Image: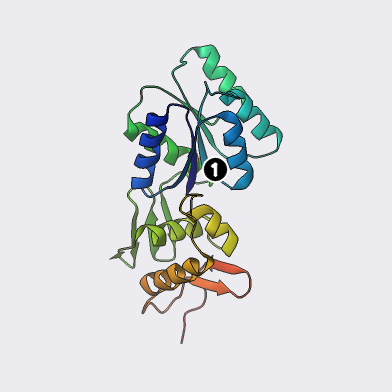
Amino acid sequence: MRILVVEDARDMNRLIVKTLTREGYTVDGCFDGEEAELYLEGAEYDAVLLDVMLPRRDGYEVLRRLRARGILTPVLFLTARDTVEDRVRGLDLGADDYLVKPFDFAELLARIRAMTRKSAGSRSNIFTLADLTVDTARHTVSRGGRQILLIAKEYAILEHLIRQRGAIVSREQLEDRIWSFEGAGSSNNIDVYISRLRKKIDGDFPVKLLHTVRGIGWALREEEREP
């Protein structure tokens, strides 16, 4: 999943970005409201962590403009302003959650999981397809009771595909979700990671789950057992 962190305190911004990256998220960070809008115009995000007190354009205005454009990306406000009025204003503008500084990173991660579960229409951190299980809280994968070890980019691709299970995901959509602006990968990288992922999750299983839709992209779905 790809997350945008909008926080003008640079040390805090870098700490959040570092923590989320270590947890396996793809993360972009920026420092003011106008810059945040440029990032949101240039990529699709699964969640936005948005400070309220920002230079050039505050978080409330960024969110108002985001929702006015019909963009429903989940937004979590991070702020030192903890009055009821502040929380009500943010929620009424379309925020999904509100976390007061200082906060514990374990709580931040839990709130991100809850927020993205809701946007995916799921009540659980565990996604399944046939005998494949992906636990997005623990970042573990198993199939047929057998644990499967994936590197970070392989896991990120699989998580995105299983959240969209049954749907065709294009190359551009995967590239947009898996690489940050700073770590942008080449188009060939997707093919390499897909090939490795297919070997690991399908391997010698008779039912194949990861399918190429020629000229369009890939889909994670259950099809007929191979003879």
- In the figure, residue 212 lies in which quadrant? bottom right
Amino acid type at circle 1 is Ser
**From the viewer's perspective, is residue 80 above or below residue 227?**
above
* Image spot of residue 136 (x, y percent): 39, 50
Give the residue drawn at x 64%, y 43%: 41
* Image spot of residue 205 (x, y percent): 38, 77
* Image spot of residue 58 (x, y percent): 58, 23
Residues 29 and 195: in front is 29
Coloured how? rainbow
* Residue 168 visible from this viewpoint: no
Q: How many numbered badges does the structure rendering display?
A: 1
Residues 204 and 73: in front is 73
> Label 1 belongs to which residue?
119
From the viewer's perspective, is 217 left or right of 11? right
Q: Which element carries disc 1, helix, strand or loop?
A: helix
**From the viewer's perspective, is residue 203 above or below residue 44?**
below
Residues 170 and 110: in front is 170
Give the residue drawn at x 30%, y 63%: 149
Give the residue drawn at x 51%, y 13%: 84
**From the viewer's perspective, is residue 161 above or below residue 99?**
below
**From the viewer's perspective, is residue 160 above or below residue 221?**
above
In the image, farthest residue toward the right? 69
In the image, farthest residue toward the bottom? 227
* Image spot of residue 9 (x, y percent): 43, 26
Crowding at dot 1, Cα within 10 Å, few <14 / some 14-19 / many 20+, comes out as some
Residues 34 and 164: in front is 34
* Residue 51 visible from this viewpoint: yes
From the viewer's perspective, is 26 left or right of 166? left
Give the residue drawn at x 52%, y 74%: 223
